[in-house]
Image: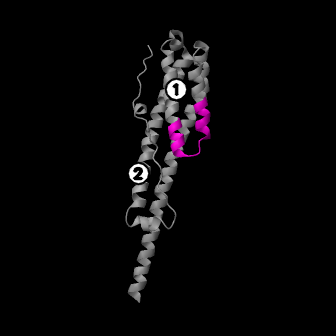
Amino acid sequence: MLELLIIIVIAVAAVIWIYNLLVKDRNQVLAAWSDIDVQLKRRHDLVPQLVTTVKAYANFEKATMTAVTELRTRSEAAAHLPEKAALETEMASAINRLIVIAEDYPDLKADHNFRQLHSELTEIEDHIQYSRRFYNGAVRIFNTRIQSFPHFLVARPFGFEVAEFFEVNDADERTTPTVELN
């Protein structure tokens, strides 16, 4: 009888320990996503300023500026991670196209506001890249844990589900264009 009680206590302690690990990992994933969201918000806040600055010099490039603005709106409304990731990838591409447009306008490249916005966007893109790596690492740890024995024995009954990676699906999007501001 005492041995049975000891086994039950050990089993309950193991379930509690595993549950707490899973909660910690899930919270790490949520915190990492929050970090990405903050950086995306910073980028979204700069988009209207960038569009306005470029528009002053490049009136006929309206299609690119409209695309950037539209993508910003759609991304802010996206509810699911895969959709948001795809839109953010498109957004980064559209912003890069907008910056490449500046290459054709020497006055724009020399504009203080544009140079400052470009610098801030570069910094934000670096932070987004770091945040995505951190998030994907947290997702990898969490997913591995909930799919591994004995953790899956606790994860399934308590409703822990696999988290989605923040991925770039288009091979062309995996390369970063280089833009020189002279």
Given residues 148 and 31, the one toward you in this image is: 148
Residue 56 seen anywhere in this rendered image of the structure = yes
Residue lying at 44% horizontally and 51% vertically, measured from the top left: 139
For the residue carrying disc 2, how many other residues have a C-alpha within 10 Å: few (<14), some (14-19), or many (20+)? Answer: some
Residue to which mark 1 is pinned: 95
Q: What numbered label is drawn on residue 140?
A: 2
Q: Dividing the image into 4 quarters, which one contains the C terminus?
A: top left
Residue interval drawn in magenta: 70-87
Question: What percent of the width, then of the height, locates residue 102?
Answer: 51, 16
Given residues 125 and 176, the one toward you in this image is: 176
User: What residue type is disc 2 on?
Assistant: Arg
Question: What percent of the width, then of the height, locates residue 110?
Answer: 51, 12
- Is 76 magenta? The answer is yes
User: What residue type is disc 1 on?
Assistant: Ile
Above/below status of 136 relative to 17:
above
Residue lying at 60% horizontally and 28% vertically, measured from the top left: 69
For the residue carrying disc 1, how many other residues have a C-alpha within 10 Å: few (<14), some (14-19), or many (20+)? Answer: many
Given residues 169 and 27, the one toward you in this image is: 169
Residue 120 seen anywhere in this rendered image of the structure = no
- Is 71 magenta? The answer is yes
